[in-house]
Amino acid sequence: RQSQTELQLIINAMPILISYVDAEERFRLNNAAYLDWYGLTPQELYGRTIREVIGEEAYFLRAPYIAEALAGRSCSFSFYTPHRDGSTRHALMNYLPRHGADGAVNGFYIFVIDETERKKTEEALRNLNETLEERVSARTEQLAQANERLQNEMFERERAEDALRHAQKMEAVGQLTGGIAHDFNNMLTGIIGSLDLMQRYIANGRADEIGRFTEAAVSSANRAAALTHRLLAFSRRQSLDRKQLHVNELVHSLEDLIRRTKGDAIELQLRLPEDLWPVSTDVSQLENALLNLVINARDAMPEGGTLLIQTANVYLDSSDITILEPVKAGEYVMLAVSDNGTGMTPSIRSKAFDPFFTTKPIGQGTGLGLSMIYGFAQQSGGHVSLDSVPGQGTCVRLYLPRLLEPAPEISSVETAEPIAASSSGETAIVVEDDPAVRMLVLDLLKELGYKTFEAENAKTALPVLESVQRVDLLVTDVGLPGMNGRQLAEIARQHRPGLKVLFMTGYAQIAAERQGFLEEGMDMVAKPFVLEVLASKIRKLSNPTL
């Protein structure tokens, strides 16, 4: 009874509507948000059918999805639905089947997110952009009628308008789409998995062991609440952990990794002057930016070529580089990555920094690399420029402001501690940046008899995968910060050709069906998942004959 009370307190604290109906479509569990939506008490809702609560017309619209859920298939859909206050709300609904001990579906969970404010924000942004285009068009017509004396002024105004339009587009897309789906699926996995394990432990008489899962569910729920608030924010950016850095030292520290990543057919050239100025920046972000540029250059040279990394001290003003945002004149350190590969057409080059724009197949690029570098440069007070010619190659230059008053030098390169070899038993490493999801997967692997290692990103996992430590299975998220899970698996299999790999993804479930993503000995599971599905995937990888 205490565990049930704690479970009810947890789901009541969540900002989303949560309910559970049994196989007869009768409500058996509801949180406070669900009851408040319909203006009902627990006694008024408990035991009533969906049809009785929402009416025939609304039930007719939901009937196909209810049938899908009771058939054991998760589904997601959006409806405009009435609220108890008389308004009509836009709701995103998720039906997740619940399986009994015999594997049969005995009901399904209902998760509802109120997206009314997000829809209003989208409409406001759409109207803003349409109005902006009208103002720009009117001003351009006026300038076109001006005499030759005003031609230079017209050019500068058009450039400023292009910069404003580009900046608003980047901010709007970043607000509506920047990682929301991936982060929210991580949170749902932490919540659903914790509740699932709590129910198992309670059923097995292990109620005193559910504390950590309760904490994980509450933590995920709190982060979900914070995320819904950030959906209404017009701009969301992460703070930088600035440290003094010599860029040449960073390049040298990553040289071995770059050489392993580039492939044998590509020649690496470094041009790093000794008198390079220091900068103050986020070391981890700059590492990720450099690795992303190296991977892009490698992919642009499938038949081989030359990869050039160079640094230089430069002085910039508005006439030196062609970029959309205004350039603050001053001294900068330039880090450039060049290739002599396929290059970009003008239309592709104009979209290169747009979030989620990619020319790569599904799973081989998220479309966030260059846009993340753009945001990092802006936050650092710097700039990014891109030059590309089809058939000749591409050069991306990252400019960081010179640090005029250097602090005492502190090494920014971390060394990995050696890991003791396993004496016996199969070993798995879990790479996941979300702590709650990582804990659930580790617990399941331990129950399956695996010895486990954990890592929150690819950089932390690489020392284990490149060591002599026994590793039989790699379980990794696809959307890791920095190097993604697919790239990590590629490097790991260079050292361990027979390594089994299970990908977890919060993006597209159909990615597993695309050629070129999954290879022999690989599988994929989509978030959020129930633990039975994850366990089945792991057993199938370990024993393909099952």
Image (tube, grey):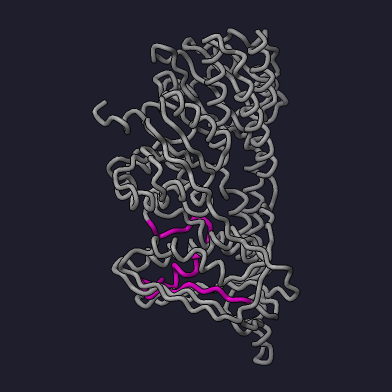
Q: Which residue is drawn at 62% across and 9% down?
A: 46
Name above or below for residue 267 compared with residue 81. below
Classify residue 410 by image quadrant.
bottom right
Q: Using the image as rendered, state which of residue 407 and residue 516 is in the foreground.
A: 407
Q: x%, y% of residue 539?
A: 34, 28
Q: Using the image as rendered, state which of residue 384 and residue 240 is in the foreground.
A: 240
Q: Which residue is drawn at 53% across and 61% down?
A: 354
Name above or below for residue 169 compared with residue 524. below
Q: Residue at x 63, y 59 (%)?
A: 129
Which quadrant holds the C terminus?
top left
Q: Using the image as rendered, state which of residue 48 and residue 394 is in the foreground.
A: 394
Name above or below for residue 488 compared with residue 296. above
The stretch of residues the image draws in magenta is 333-360
Which quadrant holds the N terminus?
top right
Classify residue 279 by image quadrant.
bottom right
- Which residue is most to the left? 545
Residue 544 appears in view? yes
Q: x%, y% of residue 462?
A: 46, 50
Q: Does the magenta stretch include residue 346?
A: yes
Q: x%, y% of residue 47?
A: 58, 7
- Which residue is most to the right? 405
- Which residue is most to the bottom? 149
Q: How many labels does the image show?
A: 0
Q: Which residue is drawn at 42% across and 50% down?
A: 488
Q: Using the image as rendered, state which of residue 408 and residue 388 is in the foreground.
A: 408
Q: Does the magenta stretch include residue 418?
A: no
Residue 137 appears in view? no
- Left/right placement of residue 54 relative to residue 222 reads left
Name above or below for residue 95 compared with residue 8. below
Q: x%, y% of residue 211?
A: 64, 21
